[in-house]
Amino acid sequence: MRWGFFHSGRFSQQYRERFGELPSATLRHWLRPAPDVAGALQYGGPVTLSLPPGEFDAYLFDCDGTIADSMPLHFLAWQETLAEWGCELSEELFYAWGGRTVPDVISDLNTARGLAMPVAAVAARHMELYEKMLPRLAAVPDVLEHIETAHGRIPFAVVSGSTRASVTASLTALGLLDRFDTMVCAGDYARPKPAPDPFLLAAERLNVDPARCLVFEDADNGIRSAQAAGMAWVHVPAPGRR
């Protein structure tokens, strides 16, 4: 079932038939009919994301929920994937994962639910479903504004807990892949967010002092990671709070 291509008039009924409940207001809003213009922003109106004072030598961006407004799509892909292995997933639990890697999440679910889901197969199925939804993916407008304004003046890095394949797919769909000088993804570091390792590795690759980096993050774990790395940060609000 291709969740990314639902029409709003049928979405709630189809979602309830699949999962036995109505989607949240956030999901109903996000998965309304796609705009006519490919890649158009889903959340209209000018929004300015205020940055902390000072000059910075590099911008480090989380991907999902920060550059890409992808979290509702990832939730649907994960919910359908896990349902195929008899594992239920709530929105609350999904959003609590922020910054964690796929192997860690599946391992925790297996332990908590008494399951034996294979990490590679589950991750591949999630990616298959997520890629089908990419035509609906949009950038976060206020973050995109800063990317376009600062691109070419200072180096950029993407620092994500997602796989390189997932991050690459999202940025390619948004036409933003070539904006970034390096990507730090799951598997590149020993300790994920909230440990400082991912952001410190990005600063090292860019040859920039961590104290001169500004981090864009939507998740608490990511902000804690930036703080632990000694970096300034800006919080990217969730869609309902923009």
Image (tube, helix red, strand yellow):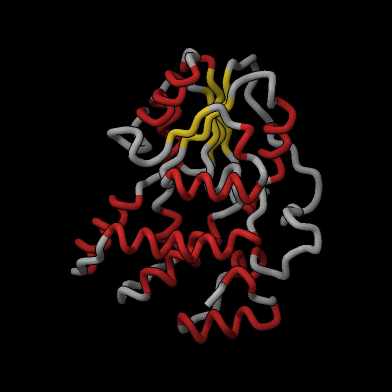
Residue 71 coordinates in the image, percent (x, y): 53, 55
Identify the image quadrant of residue 171: top right
Identity of the residue drawn at 37% across and 36% down: 194
Q: In this rendering, would 85 be left or right of 79?
A: left
Viewer-nearest residue: 139 or 163: 163
Work out whether 241 lies above or below 24: above
Residue 154 coordinates in the image, percent (x, y): 63, 19
Residue 80 coordinates in the image, percent (x, y): 44, 72
Viewer-nearest residue: 64 or 136: 136
Viewer-nearest residue: 132 or 213: 132
Identity of the residue drawn at 40% across and 69% down: 81
Viewer-nearest residue: 123 or 19: 123
Residue 17 coordinates in the image, percent (x, y): 51, 86
Identity of the residue drawn at 33% across and 39% down: 187
Identify the image quadrant of residue 3: bottom right
Identity of the residue drawn at 55% across and 60% down: 72
Work out whether 100 lies above or below 207: below
